Amino acid sequence: MLLLAGLGNPGERYARHRHNIGFQAADTIRLRRSFGPWRNRFQSEVSEGKFGTEKCLLMKPMTFMNNSGQAIGEAMRFYKLEPNDVVVIHDELDLPPGKLRAKAGGGVAGHNGLRSTAAHIGPDFRRIRVGIGHPGNKNMVHRYVLNDFSKADQDWVDPMLDAIADNAEFLARGEDSSFMNRVHLATNSNDDSKD
């Protein structure tokens, strides 16, 4: 079973913030992959579905970003999962807008959602880092991440979210590099053909 957690902050005022791209990805996966309705469980909104034969619990922790790990840890323990069964989708300041990287384990790079998750389940979970760019000055980071994407950003945000949803089955199979490659092809190519 895959536990796929998108990170963000609950509430309409945060919905389109850069910091909420994990929530936006979870919403897109649920809609495009015909997962069940959102239900309240594990201090989260959760939706159940499958990628092929692999069960997936899609979740959006409602604990606010800084306490995301509480919810993720609760669900992981309930299902008796290992950290490698957990994939966290989050915003990444250190990647250019529209770039995506898959990574297993590692540090938290100042990201409070990752810090909380690592504190509750250890550092060895898998991460999908979605680049949102950096404002250029560390004093501007807080305001930057807690603001809506610009209209110009929509040129890459919507295709990125669609590509994440369309290729999520690779994450369920543990093929994170294939997932990353497929998303890259879908978001950086004028060729719409699939192989």
Image: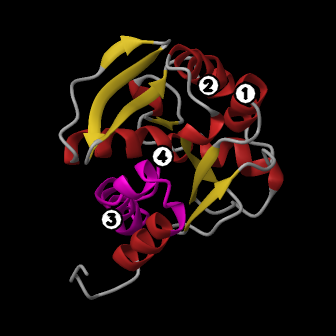
Which callout, 1 or 3, points to the residue nearer the camera?
A: 1
Q: Which residue is mark 3?
A: 159
Residue density around tag 1, few if under 14, some if 14–19, many if 20 or more, within 10 Å: many
Q: Left or right? Give the position of 29 relative to 127.
A: left
Q: CA distance from mark 2 to mark 3?
A: 26 Å
Q: Relative to 174, say whether 23 is above or below.
A: above
CB of mark 1 within 8 Å of CB of mark 2? yes
Q: Secondary structure at mark 2?
A: helix
Which residues, given as a range, are shown in magenta? Answer: 149-177
Q: Which residue is mark 2?
A: 68
Q: Nearer the viewer, residue 175 or 114?
A: 175
Q: CA distance from mark 1 to mark 3?
A: 29 Å
Q: Which amino acid type is marked by label 2? A: Ser
Q: Which residue is mark 1?
A: 116
Q: Secondary structure at mark 3?
A: helix
Q: Relative to 57, say whether 31 is above or below.
A: below
Q: Which amino acid type is marked by label 1? A: Ser
Q: CA distance from mark 4 to mark 3?
A: 13 Å
Whole-percent x and y of residue 114? Answer: 70, 37
Q: Secondary structure at mark 1?
A: helix
- Number of on-image labels: 4
User: Mark 1 vs mark 3: which is more N-terminal?
Assistant: 1
Q: Which amino acid type is marked by label 3? A: Pro
Quadrant of image for the N terminus: top left
Q: Left or right? Give the position of 183 relative to 77.
A: left
Whole-percent x and y of residue 119? Answer: 78, 26
Q: Nearer the viewer, residue 10 or 165?
A: 165
The residue that appears at 39% across and 26% down in the rendered structure is 12
